[in-house]
Amino acid sequence: MKSIIVMVLVLIFNQFASAQSSNLHWNLEKGIALQGYDAVAYHTQKKAVRGKQTLSLSHGGALWYFESSANRELFRKSPASYEPSYGGWCAFAYPDKLE
């Protein structure tokens, strides 16, 4: 009986967690994530690199710009690996942005 209760709680938690991640409040300026910087370049080049509007991708209610088509494909394959923590908000300010 305990294992059934634990399993039900795990299922409920997983549903709640996935709903939370899909409702992330992004820090967007005119619908563009990271103010147009390439999210992948932060990880691969270790610096901020401006993305190109011609190399964009729509994801999570935002438009993401990339420096290269290779970076766009890396993001497309695993967006969670490159999405900014706290939706791009400062960790201190993030709770104030929730409605």
Image: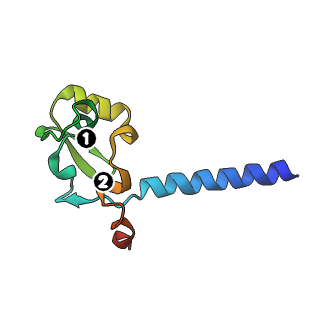
* Residue at the limit of the structure toward the right, as seen here: 1
Point 36% across, 31% down: residue: 77
Q: Establish if 20 lies above or below 72.
A: below
Q: CA distance from mark 2 to mark 1?
A: 15 Å
Which residue is the site of mark 2? Answer: 61
Tell me if mark 1 has few (under 14), some (14-19) or many (20+) residues whose alpha carbon lies within 10 angstroms of its own: many
At label 2, which amino acid type do we have? Gly
Tell me if mark 2 has few (under 14), some (14-19) or many (20+) residues whose alpha carbon lies within 10 angstroms of its own: some
Point 17% across, 52% down: residue: 35
Tell me: 66 left or right of 85: left
Q: Establish if 31 lies above or below 75.
A: below
Q: Nearer the viewer, residue 79 or 41?
A: 41
Residue 65 sits in quarter: top left
Task: Determine which of the numbered discs, if any, sits on residue 74 in the image.
Answer: none
Which residue is the site of mark 1? Answer: 39
Residue 68 x %, y %: 16, 29
At label 1, which amino acid type do we have? Ala
Disc 2, SS: loop
User: Reading the chain from its start, which is encountered first: label 2 or label 1?
Assistant: 1
Residue 96 x %, y %: 36, 73
Disc 1, SS: helix
Label 2 with label 1: CB-CB less than 8 Å: no
User: Which quarter shows the C terminus?
Assistant: bottom left
Q: Nearer the viewer, residue 2 or 55?
A: 2
Q: Nearer the viewer, residue 39 or 61?
A: 39
Colouring style: rainbow
